[in-house]
Amino acid sequence: MARRVFFSFHYQRDIWRINQIRSIPNILGSAAAGFQDASLWEEAKRKSDAAIKKLIDDALYNTSVTVVFIGNQTANRKYIKYEIEKSIERGNGVVGIQIHHLKDKNQNVDEPGKTPKLLMDSGFNVYKYIDYEKLANRIEEAAKIAGK
């Protein structure tokens, strides 16, 4: 049975990096609150704060783990904080994965970004992305820690 996982990340800056790792065997990811393509993201940006939070809440439904992909600007994003808060509230396992070293659409890597404060303060593990097998193991580890 596949595990449902919520992917939290800075959409505009890191979607190219996330698309490189999204297809993990046995993992059903909900990329950025279900914003799996640019048109959905653009539509969401025109909605109210409450509407965006509802989209995030709906995407978190029936997930057991939240992966916070950490790029150069992730820690500064309002909705990343909200996604972590809601993940903790629902009892999801949470894990941080650094992705700054993956190439963007222009084949550039980035400088490491700060880990979101709430992720650090809550004591969740943070790892550098190596490959999808290690990521799958980190997801299972987070699930086990959360009792899922």
Image: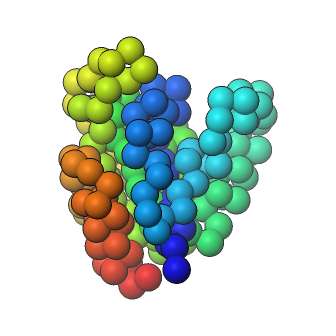
Q: Is residue 81 visible?
A: no
Residue 107 appears at what percent x and percent y?
33, 18
Q: Is residue 93 visible?
A: yes
Q: Nearer the viewer, residue 39 or 76?
A: 39
For residue 74, which quarter of the picture? top left
Position of residue 85 relative to residue 80, above or below, is below
Residue 73 appears at what percent x and percent y?
37, 28
In the displayed structure image, the side of residue 36 where residue 100 appears, left or right? left
Furthest residue in direction top, as rendered: 106
In the displayed structure image, the side of residue 37 where residue 129 appears, left or right? left
Q: How many marks?
A: 0
Position of residue 21 relative to residue 57, above or below, is above
User: Could you tell me which residue is drawn at 46 percent across and 68 percent down?
Assistant: 26
User: Could you tell me which residue is drawn at 22 percent across and 48 percent down?
Assistant: 130
Residue 117 appears at what percent x and percent y?
32, 46
User: Could you tell me which residue is drawn at 34 percent across and 34 percent down?
Assistant: 71
For residue 109, which quarter of the picture? top left
For residue 14, which quarter of the picture? top left
Figure coloring: rainbow
Q: Quadrant of the C terminus?
A: bottom left
User: Could you tell me which residue is drawn at 31 percent across and 78 percent down?
Assistant: 145
Residue 129 appears at what percent x and percent y?
25, 47
